[in-house]
Image: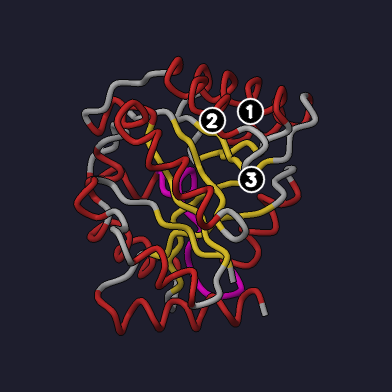
Amino acid sequence: MHVNFDAEGKDQALQGNEYKEVYDFGLHWSETFQSSHFDGDSARIIDLVREFGRRLSINLVIGNAAYGLKPKFDSLEKIVRELSGECQIKLGAEGKVYGKRAIDLASGIHATAYILHTPSMDELLDYAKSKKVCSFVYTLCRISGSKPSAISEISSKKEGYFKRRGIALEEISRNIANFAVYGTRDEVAAQISVILDQGASKVVLCPVFYGTRDMLNQMKELGRVVG
């Protein structure tokens, strides 16, 4: 199992001895860092890599302006230079322009492209292939009894996620296939296969869940999908 930590704010990020607890548990894991925070976090990121780099990889992404973050590509380039050769690096950005710039940068250092499941995904996967860059796709995931129930569950839990991308609540059902894999186990498996067939090396799943019990149930369902 490879676990990805993707905190939407510093209050949700791993702290202090929590890193060692994850490491001692025996997992390979990744953590995502936004470029708007690199200037303050670069020393901490480097320290984490040096301490846990045998099982820690780093996702460096351009901060989405919709989250109130200022995209800073120069900060991304700086931290990439500092980390190059120290650990596995995945580089990503939302949107075609920054997404392609991240792929160009990944090409120069043999890093992986970290592509968000959005309407730009197909074009960015094709661009990564043209640059001979390995790519991972990050997508929302909800396994349910049917597609309609999965859409309802994603909509009620992730309304803000879609709103930040210009999609109102009543429009989510018409657009959800551009942002998530969802439905029954078989439907989710088929949607993952399509993304892999488009050129992604791996699909990083972000389960949509309600509380700990539901999260564990989603993990069990995902285990049946990939198992």
The correct choice, above or below, for 10 with respect to 192 in the image is above
Residue at 38% over, 51% down: 6
What kind of element bears circle 2? loop
Looking at the rendered image, the quarter that the N terminus falls into is bottom right
Residue at 50% over, 34% down: 119
Q: Which of 200 and 60 is in front in this view?
A: 60
Q: Name the residue under label 1.
A: 123
- Structural distance between the alpha carbons of marks 1 and 2: 6 Å
Stretch of the chain drawn in magenta: 175-187
Locate residue 174 relative to residue 139 in the image: left or right. Answer: left
User: Where is residue 203 drawn, in percent x and y?
Assistant: 61, 55
Q: Residue 24 carries which label?
A: none
Looking at the rendered image, the quarter that the C terminus falls into is bottom right
Q: Type of residue at label 2?
A: Ser
What kind of element bears circle 1? helix
Occupied quadrant, residue 223: bottom right
Q: Nearer the viewer, residue 61 or 24?
A: 24
Do the residues bearing badges 1 and 2 touch, measured as CB atoms within 8 Å? Answer: yes
Q: Nearer the viewer, residue 194 or 115?
A: 115
Within 10 angstroms of label 1, few (less than 14), some, or many (20 or more) residues? few
